[in-house]
Amino acid sequence: ILEQYREEFDETAMHGPDHDKAEVKASEQVVPNDGVFTDEPNAIEHTNDDELSDDSLMEEFDKELKKHGDTGPRHSENLQRDQTAELSSLASSRSPTDKLRKFFGEDAAAAAAANYSPKQAVGGNVWYLGYGYRPNDIMFSMEGSVRGGTLEALIERLTLHDYLDMNFIATFLLTYRSFCTTEELISHLQRRYTLAPPEELTMEELEIWVEKKLKLVRLRVFNVLKTWIENYYYQEDYGVLENLRQFTVTVIRDTLTFPAEQLERLINMRLEKDKQSEMKKMISNNNSIAPMPILPRNLKRIRLLDLDSVELARQLTIIDFKLYSAIRPIECLDKAWSRDDETGKTASNIKASILFCNQVTAWVSDSILSQHEAKKRAAILKHWVQVAERCRTLGNFNTCMAILSAFDNSAIGRLKRTWEIVGARTNQTLVQIRKLMGHEKNFIEYREIIHSINPPCIPFLGIYLQDLTFIEDGNSNYLKKTQDLINFAKRMKTAEVIREIQQYQSVSYSLQPVRELQLFIKTHLENSRDEEILYSLSVALEPKEREDEKIARLLQESGFL
């Protein structure tokens, strides 16, 4: 009998039970994160045994066969499966009543056997294998993607028995916190796992419903839970873990033994990591050797112009990437970075990145205005232009833009005497940077560049925040003319921006931090003067000139007077 099952499994794996449906292997049932569990700030490092491989599934299949097997005959038509993975992992008994007892208990099996009355399907479709949501509970676009739906319909869409939309699942898990809580999500998934059959099914129909729908729904729920724990769990979700663990070791273990063991192990790993406050983010290195730092002669007394522009750009990049890579998807929802809270935890990483850019801008301005002579101001300005260019070549567009913002603010931009001394080469470099980072046509040139380069890279965060703001302000949370259909199209747009942010978080720079230089940078970032004071200083250094005063000054500086 076991050999017959194996042959049917091989046949299904080769051709599929339904030629109109694509094969979906067991490992493809888990929502992928581009093949790497490192795009989220708290991804769990996993090993190969996490995957539902064919061998492990067949081992589980053998166990179930021995556990529930009997000597009675089994018809091959009852062995059909919609997905190859479910066939191999969810073996069941050959007796219909044994199967019903296993899933629903003695009462359900007895009731189904006593109430046998064949029912014809309408229009050739098996009515009891349909979806639970009503047509008005969900809406689709012309392309077939989900536009909106009730929370119940969207969660059912996550775990359909006959359709797998990987993009929908990934988008849902990225953005669900904008329309429901984690507790609600887990509760709905648990109800979905314990799905009840339609009323008045015959024994035969109930057996088909279990085989064709319930088992597949349960495996879908398992995969969604597994993916959520691995890639979308945050420390704030700690409160649901114990409830989920109890559900796993009782309800899931009774029906899917091997998957339950996987899920329990992942939950325990999360519980341990939370207790130790070691939420780990896995960031891959680009496998290149870090260049030797370019150090100034005297590390005990560092001056700005003593720092090589390349090394200063590297050290700033180390700080900036650490802040950028810590940004979590939840911080990108509902303009969380624009809200203040008493705990200071709301979008804390985005706020930290914004603060860093503002501090860099203030430091650049302060260092220029700290010089009383125009020539010395021009020397500092030229140095910062070189640093901005080095940041650009490193792919650090965020710090590059922060430095550029200092040149364009009122306190520095009005220093005509200083700008006149800056050389042509420096001005040409600055023109090229301004052209790249210019806001014309919604930063079209910058967007083309950022989409053509490979990590490591630090994109200009301000553009993403601008895009997220437009999406949030320009789209309602619910579809128009409805009160309960969540606007999922809005969440799809948000997810596109979040994925682009994540794209550059997973590969770090191979750069070596220098403690003395990091301390020098930190000190100046935290002690720069504010914009109002800097503007007053700028006016004092270079008062506004009348045209005749300017001509007289230029003649005097050139030696004619």
Image: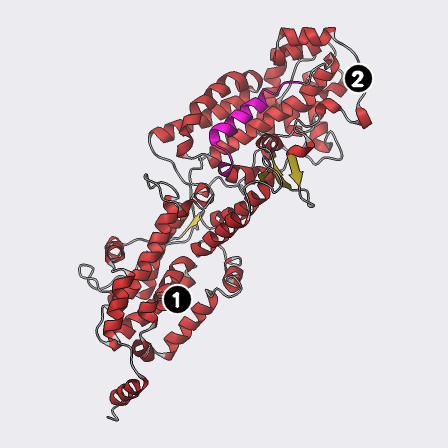
Q: Which amino acid, by three-letter code, is at mark 2?
A: Lys
The disc at residue 389 is: 1
Q: Nearer the viewer, residue 517 or 288?
A: 517
State the CA–CA distance, disc 1 to disc 2: 75 Å
Viewed as shown, does residue 308 lie left or right of 56?
left
Q: Quadrant of residue 327?
A: top left
Q: Nearer the viewer, residue 105 or 135?
A: 135
Q: Which residue: 26% across, 72% down?
A: 539
Q: Quadrant of residue 149?
A: top right
Viewed as shown, does residue 422 lie left or right of 489?
left
Percent coordinates x, y for residue 361 in the rendering = 33, 61
Percent coordinates x, y for residue 554 in the rendering = 29, 87
Q: Which residue: 40% across, 71% down?
A: 430
Whether pointer 1 and pointer 2 mark residues with C-beta atoms closer than 8 Å, the reply is no
Question: Is residue 47 visible in this depiction of the protein?
Answer: no
Q: Which residue: 59% across, 44% down?
A: 489
- Specify whether residue 375 is painted magenta: no
Percent coordinates x, y for residue 540 in the rendering = 23, 72
The disc at residue 119 is: 2
- The stretch of residues the image draws in magenta is 177-197
* Color style of the picture: secondary structure
Question: Is residue 60 visible in this depiction of the protein?
Answer: yes
**Would you say the magenta stretch is mainly helix, strand or loop?**
helix
- Eyeballing the image, is 229 above or below 443? above
Q: Which amino acid, by three-letter code, is at mark 1?
A: Glu
Give the secondary structure at mark 2: loop
